[in-house]
Amino acid sequence: MRQHKIAVIPGDGIGIEVIEAGKQVLQALAEKSGELSFEFSDFPWSSDYYLEHGRYIPEGGLDELARFDAIYFGSVGSQQVPDHVSLWDLRLAICQGFDQYANVRPARLLPGVNSRLQGAEKIDWVIIRENSEGEYSGNGGRVHRGLPEEIGTEVSIFSRKGVERIHRFAFEMARSRPRKKLTLVTKSNAQRHGMVLWDEVFFEVAKDYPEVETDRELVDAVTTRMVLKPDTLDTVVATNLHADIISDLAAALTGSLGIAPTANLNPERTFPSMFEPIHGSAFDIAGQGIANPVGAFWTAVMMLEHLGEATAAERLMAAIERLTRSGIHSQDLGGTATTRELTQAICEDIRQQSDQA
C-alpha cells in the first residue's frame, strides 16, 4: 500500500467546497485501486483565521507543511481582507517559502464542453509561469504616504538563475510533448533590462535543446494569437505577471475558469509542491453549492502525476472526460448540476470503471 500525506488548505469561498469534493474523489479512487491511500490533514488557514488571529499562517506553519508529500490548496481572498494581504500572506508565502518556481497550467477543451471560440478544439497548451520573481518579486515600497508627492514602486526582478531554471523547465516540458514546440512570451521591446535578459537566456538555453522548435511573441500579440490561431501554440513560457493573465484567457477560451488546474512545483523536490484550481474564491457563488469542482479534480490529476501515481492520474483524467462528455455540467458550463451532484457522479463512475477492470 502506497500512502501519500496531503496537507489540505481549503482557504476561502468556493475553495472550501471544491477541495472537499476533490478529497472525496481521491478517496474513491484510492478505495477502488486497493494500492494507494491518502492521509489528509486539514489546515484552517483562511481569511476568517486571519481576522481572528491576525495572520494566515501561524508560527512554524511552513515547517509543519514541509513534512507533507504535497499541498492541496483551494483559494484565498475575502471581501474583509485587502487582496494584497491575503495573497502575500498565504498563497505567495507558501510558493516563495517552498521555492515553487514552476507554475504549470494546462489548457484544452474537454469533451462535451462548449467554447465561445470557434476552433477551440485545436487548443492543447501548457503554459509555464515563472513563479518566484519577475513582477511578483515583492521588491518595492511607498514613500511620502498621503502627500501629493507620494511614490509607490514595484520592481520586477529577473535573476539569471531564476530565468534560466524556468526556461530549462519549459524546454524539458516542450521536449516531452508530441509537437516539441516552445513559445517565448516577452515584452522586451518596452522593458529593456530585465526582459531583455529573459530573452537572452531563453536563446542560450535553446542551444541545449535543438530538437525543440522555438518562437518568440510579445505578450500583447500572443493574446490575439491565442484567439485567432490557437493551433500555432503548444508549450508557452512567460513571466509571473504575463502568464498569470494569459492562463486565465486560456481557461476562458476552453470553457470556464471553473475547469482549469494549476501546479506550483518545486521541481527539485526540496520542498512539497502545491496544487490548486485556478478560479479563486468566487465570492459571488460561494456557499451556494454550485461551484464547478472539475478544476479541483483536474488539479488532483496533476498532484497524482507529481506523486508518481501515473496510473491513478490516467484513471481520474479519463473519469473527468467521461463526466464532461456525459453532459452533466455545472452552471458555468450551461448546466444545472450542483457541486455535490458532479462529485457523486464522478465517484460512482470511478467505482463502476474499477469494478469492470
Image: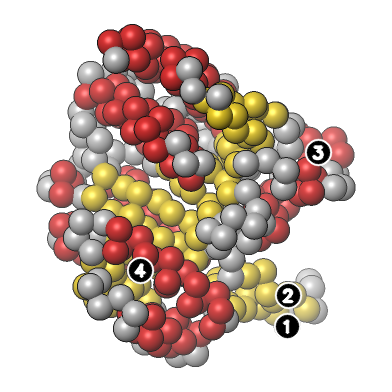
The colour scheme is secondary structure
Coordinates of residue 117 in the picture (x, y in percent): 18, 46
**174 horizontally vs 49: left or right:** left
Earlier sequence position, callout 1 versus callout 4: 1
**Front of the two marks 3 and 1:** 3
Three-letter code for the amino acid on which mark 3 is drawn:
Leu
Name of the residue lying farthest toward the left: 119
Coordinates of residue 319 in the picture (x, y in percent): 32, 24
Instruction: Give the CA separation, mark 1 to mark 4.
Output: 45 Å
The residue under the point 85% across, 47% down is 60
Instruction: Give the CA separation, mark 2 to mark 1.
Output: 14 Å
Instruction: Tell me whether circle 2 and circle 3 mark residues in contact (CB < 8 Å).
Output: no
Instruction: Tell me whether circle 1 and circle 4 mark residues in contact (CB < 8 Å).
Output: no
Residue in the foreground of this view, choosing between 67 and 34: 34
Q: Report the disc number at residue 141.
A: 2
Instruction: Tell me whether circle 3 and circle 1 mark residues in contact (CB < 8 Å).
Output: no
The C terminus: image quadrant: top left
Three-letter code for the amino acid on which mark 4 is drawn:
Phe
Earlier sequence position, callout 3 versus callout 1: 3
Residue with the mark numbered 4: 171
**Front of the two marks 1 and 4:** 4
Residue with the mark numbered 3: 51
Residue with the mark numbered 1: 149
**194 horizontally vs 152: left or right:** left
Instruction: Give the CA separation, mark 2 to mark 3.
Output: 25 Å
Indicate the quadrant where residue 216 lies: bottom left
Residue in the foreground of this view, choosing between 77 and 269: 269
Secondary structure category for the residue under label 3 = helix
Instruction: Give the CA separation, mark 3 to mark 1.
Output: 33 Å
Instruction: Give the CA separation, mark 4 to mark 2.
Output: 35 Å
* As drawn, 234 above or below 210: above
Q: Is residue 342 visible?
A: yes
